[in-house]
Amino acid sequence: MDKIPLGALISITYRSHFVRINNQMKELGLSAGQFLVLMVLSDEHDITQETLVGRLLIDKGSIARAINVLEDKGLVKRSTDESNRRAVRLHLTETGEQLIPEVVRIDREWEEAAFSGLTEDEKTQAKRLLLKITQNSYETVYENGDKKWKEFPLKDMQ
């Protein structure tokens, strides 16, 4: 196990998650890219597009394309922020809200498969350790003098 780099393990996990989610989202006429946006919007209603970019650490163009698709499908609605006319706020539509249980089910099924054979304590410990590894990795890349530096976006989940 020591011969396999941590990055390779994370990459394989990410890729297999992406492929599975993408295959299942195709049945809904969507992709894995839109999946992430829907998951965030299901937890955080009425957020700005800029906030979404920060939560997912995905570039603005990719987020804009995902939002365009979701808006075209009637799942997300954009509105202008009344206090900052340049900011765009995002909302799930009623149709989008109705889709969320299916999207969550798809994610939960993957997580159950990924955690198969682990006890509840092992699952909790694995998530806690992975969150810490993620934070350490993030902070190593975006050190405090870097103009792209933003506080670790998942800090509230610890």
Image: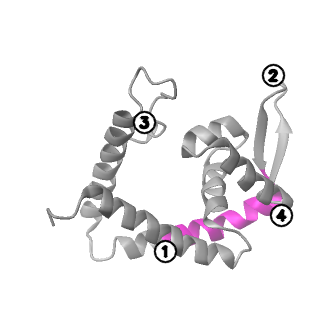
Does residue 48 show up? no
Tell me the magenta residue range: 92-109
Q: CA distance from mark 3 to mark 4?
A: 32 Å
Residue marked by disc 1: 109
Q: Give the residue displayed 31% in from the left and 63% down from the top.
A: 9
The answer, for residue 52, to whether it is visible in the render is yes
Left or right of residue 60: residue 156: left
Residue at image position (31%, 39%) is 136
Camera-side mark, 4 or 2:
4
Image side of residue 57 versus residue 82, left or right: left
- Residue 64 locus on image (x, y percent): 73, 47
**Label 1 neighbour load within 10 Å: few <14, some 14-19, many 20+:** few
Q: CA distance from mark 1 to mark 4?
A: 24 Å
Amino acid, disc 4? Lys
Q: Earlier in the sequence, mark 1 or mark 2?
A: 2
Q: Specify the amino acid type for callout 1.
A: Glu
> In the image, residue 72 lies at what x, y percent?
85, 60
Which residue is under mark 4?
73
Reading the chain from its start, which is encountered first: label 1 or label 4?
A: 4
Location of residue 55 (image quadrant) = top right
Could you give the CA–CA distance between mark 3 and mark 1, rounded to whole angstroms?
Answer: 25 Å
Q: Pointers 3 and 1 in contact (CB under 8 A)?
A: no
User: Which label's residue is closer to the chain start, 3 or 1?
Assistant: 1
Q: Which residue is mark 3?
A: 155
